[in-house]
Image (tube, rainbow, N blue to C red):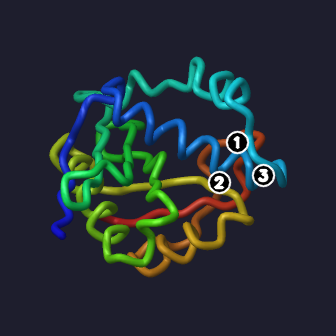
Amino acid sequence: MTWTFLPEPVDAPESLALRRDYYADVAGRYWGRPATGAEVDEGLAGDGVELLVPPTGGFVVARLGGEAVGCGGFLMLDGDRAELTRVFLRHGHRGRGGAGPLLRAVEDGARELGARRMVLNTRLDLVEARALYARHGYAEIPAYCTGPYMEVWYGKEL
């Protein structure tokens, strides 16, 4: 099966399903229990995803054999810096060679909008994500923002 990584609307049904799965995964890990549908709805409400469209950002859907199995986005923070966000592969599709190309596709989208540096924030418990970022050239940087779920920050020159 072949991987594809293409920009898609954040409000398309498959994009929304991926965003719901992403939020359920990270929230459930944080709380130590599965997130309820109502909690996922609450977390997605007002999450700023409408900015993940040019010229303020972008959103990529990863497909394996045509099936939407992952996503990633970026938000332009200023003229040359973008923030990586919502990088996710469904659990059954991890370890199949899609994460690195997904990151590259999101980075390419940011470059097209003028980004020369990608930054991100994450939590310490998301060890798989942190390992992925380190494998692909991201290094810890000083905090560039604050928030309740931000514990470590990374950056990479594009």
CA separation in Å, label 1 and label 3: 17 Å
- 28 displayed left or right of 100: right
Q: Nearer the viewer, mark 1 or mark 3?
A: 3
Q: Helix, strand or loop at disc 1? A: loop
Q: Helix, strand or loop at disc 2? A: loop
User: Pointer 3: residues within 10 angstroms few (<14), some, or many (20+)?
Assistant: some
Extreme-bottom residue of the structure: 135
- 132 displayed left or right of 103: right
- Measured along the vertical axis of the image, is residue 140 above or below residue 54? below
In the image, what residue type sits under mark 2? Ala
- Measured along the vertical axis of the image, is residue 73 above or below residue 4? above
Q: Earlier in the sequence, mark 3 or mark 2?
A: 3
Whether tag 1 and tag 2 are in contact, CB under 8 A, the answer is: yes
- 50 displayed left or right of 5: right
In the image, what residue type sits under mark 1? Thr
Residue 110: mark in rendering: none
Rendered image quadrant of residue 94:
bottom left
- 114 displayed left or right of 102: left
In the image, what residue type sits under mark 3? Tyr
User: Pointer 1: residues within 10 angstroms few (<14), some, or many (20+)?
Assistant: few
Q: Badge 1 is on which residue? A: 146
Percent across and percent down for residue 98 are 32, 69
Front residue of this view, candidates 21 and 146? 21
Front residue of this view, candidates 14 and 113? 14
Extreme-top residue of the structure: 46
Q: Earlier in the sequence, mark 1 or mark 3?
A: 3
Residue 30: mark in rendering: 3
Residue at 25% of width from left, 61% of height from top?
Answer: 64
Q: Badge 2 is on which residue? A: 143
Rendered image quadrant of residue 105:
bottom left
Percent across and percent down for residue 80 are 30, 45
- Measured along the vertical axis of the image, is residue 151 above or below residue 15? below
